[in-house]
Image: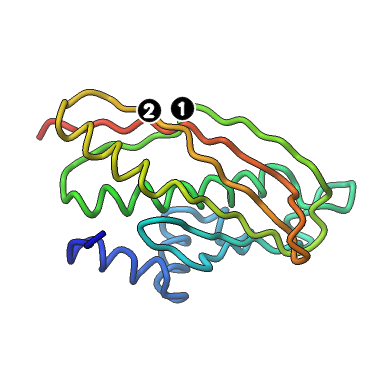
Amino acid sequence: MLLSPRAKHFLHRILHPVWFRIFLIWKLPMAFWAGLRVISADTEQAQVSVPYKRLNQNPFQSTYFAVLAMAGEMATGILGLLAIENSGLPIAILVVGLEAEFSKKATDLSTFTCTDGKAFFDAVAETTRTGEAVTLTALSIGRNKNGEEVARFRITWSLKKRSR
């Protein structure tokens, strides 16, 4: 899929370590302190990692569930924001639901992957065409360094074209 110059600029900033940290400090300071990093992102998928460190841990010596949820949400949200930037239109995006499953203690770096890029681009096209809100549920799967699944998040997003 071809990206608009605006979407390419957004992707460049998200993937650039310094620009991404500035974005986090400005818009998502908790994600900055937790150490979230974008590993990769394109029109198809996004990967976000979060380290296991003292600030992120719970009393059970694993990564706190809310920190994992933050990384899982970001892996999906990047795809939504990229689709919106590509459209060039004012579109609101909001989390309206979250389901989580935890399968293993997260005791090292956790990397979350979402492969629902096409669904976000389709949702943006639909809300642009109809003017109605569109909801979609994106799956983000977190794995440890050994490739073992630690958590799975289903994030439900609502997208709606704003009136100018």
Quadrant assignment, res 51: bottom right
Q: Earlier in the sequence, mark 2 or mark 1?
A: 1
Q: Is residue 122 left or right of residue 42?
A: left
Q: Is residue 86 left or right of residue 55?
A: left
Q: Is residue 151 left or right of residue 127?
A: right
* Tag of residue 106: none
Task: Name the residue type under label 1.
Answer: Val
Q: Residue reaching furthest left?
A: 164
Task: Name the residue type under label 2.
Answer: Thr
Residue 149 at what x, y percent from top left?
Answer: 74, 51
Residue 132 at what x, y percent from top left?
Answer: 22, 23
* Tag of residue 96: 1
Q: Work out whether 42 lies above or below 62.
A: below
Q: Is residue 106 left or right of residue 19?
A: right
Residue 35 at what x, y percent from top left?
Answer: 62, 64
Name the residue at 77% across, 56% down.
148
Label 2 belongs to which residue?
135
Q: How is the image coloured?
A: rainbow
Mark 1 and mark 2 in contact (Cβ < 8 Å)?
yes
Q: Work out whether 142 lies above or below 122.
A: below
Q: Mark 2 falls on what kind of element?
A: strand
Name the residue at 19% across, 49% down.
87
Name the residue at 66% across, 49% down.
67
Quadrant location, the N terminus: bottom left
How many numbered tags mark residues here? 2
Q: Residue reaching furthest right?
A: 60
